[in-house]
Amino acid sequence: MANADTDPAHRPSSARIYDALLGGNHNFAADREAAQHLLAAIPGAGEMARANRAFLHRAVRFLLDRGIRQFLDIGSGIPTVGNVHEVAQRRAPDARVVYVDIDPVAVAHSNDILKDNPSAVAVQADMRFPEAVLEHPSVRALLDLDQPVGLLLVAVLHFVPDDDAYAAVARLRAALPAGSYIVISHGVLEIVEDAATEQVTALYRRTDVSAAHGRTRAQILRFFGDAALVPPGLVWVHEWPDGGDGEPHGMAVVAAVGQV
């Protein structure tokens, strides 16, 4: 029998908290309660989630305009409330998408959503072990890693400790052929909302990721390695791709796209 620590109905997950913040319905009471605690610590968390999802849509359309037809979305959560395969396949019906998440419940929900879509699939894997992602049979079956790929790491890296995150992203980036793109959004340590860091970290310790911490802009830029940043570079998530000097409005999230 599952207990409160293992039963997904009682233990919140980062994917389902995000779904709750977006107004989705693939979440449990524990996730909605955690989302409310997050909103109490960071009142703009819901706005950040929506701005982050809007950035994901813009980035996917940007990559489609540059000929990308296959996407590897790591830390995808549940593909609902505006998802990659719908955005991509609406414009390019031949687009293929693999979602990767650590949460088995999110993956199960995802595959239920995707059951009638042969060009999209969700797999359970931990990005800290990139070989498990790259060598997964579903990844190999659906994606051609000899052709350009859109690697999406949207709102996931701030859940991964430094020792794992930089090495994992470097390996994933090295596996991308020339002409690929890497898309990242990340919590940044820069503005007043950063004072809530300890509360947020304590909240996420109860979930599947166990950690949540922002990084400085310089630390976030390290993830791109030698990839050439697409203008305007690393900006507030709601400003990409237009950039400018607008106020952050409590976003506490930055984003960029780089070409490998």
Image (tube, rainbow, N blue to C red):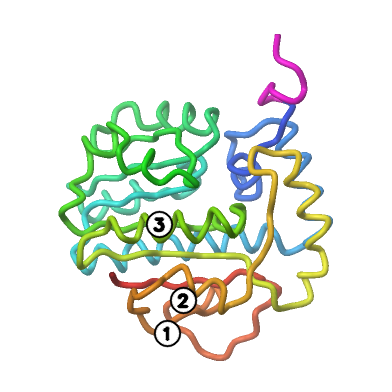
Front-lying residue, 158 or 111: 158
Which residue position is annotated with label 3?
152
Q: Quadrant of residue 178?
A: bottom left
Q: In which quarter of the image is the C terminus?
A: bottom left
Q: Is residue 16 above or below residue 238?
A: above
Q: In this view, does 256 lie above or below 127?
A: below
Q: Are marks 2 and 1 in contact (CB under 8 Å)?
A: yes
The disc labelled 1 sits on which kind of residue? Pro
Point out the stretch of residues depicted in magenta. Answer: 1-9
Residue sitting at the far top: 1
Q: Earlier in the sequence, mark 2 or mark 3?
A: 3
Tell me the element at label 2.
loop
Structural crowding at the residue carrying mark 1, measured as other residues with C-alpha within 10 Å and reported as few (<14), some (14–19) or many (≥20): some
Alpha carbon separation for disc pair 1 and 3: 18 Å
The disc labelled 3 sits on which kind of residue? Leu
Q: In which quarter of the image is residue 152?
A: bottom left
Q: In this view, does 208 lie above or below 41?
A: above
Residue sitting at the far bottom: 245
Alpha carbon separation for disc pair 2 and 3: 15 Å
Left or right, residue 146 beside residue 260: left
Q: Which mark is residue 240?
A: 2
Q: Position of residue 88 (x, y in %)?
A: 29, 53
Which residue position is annotated with label 1?
232
The disc labelled 2 sits on which kind of residue? Trp
Q: In this view, does 172 lie above or below 100?
A: below
Alpha carbon separation for disc pair 2 and 1: 7 Å
Left or right, residue 92 beside residue 31: left
Left or right, residue 15 beside residue 30: left
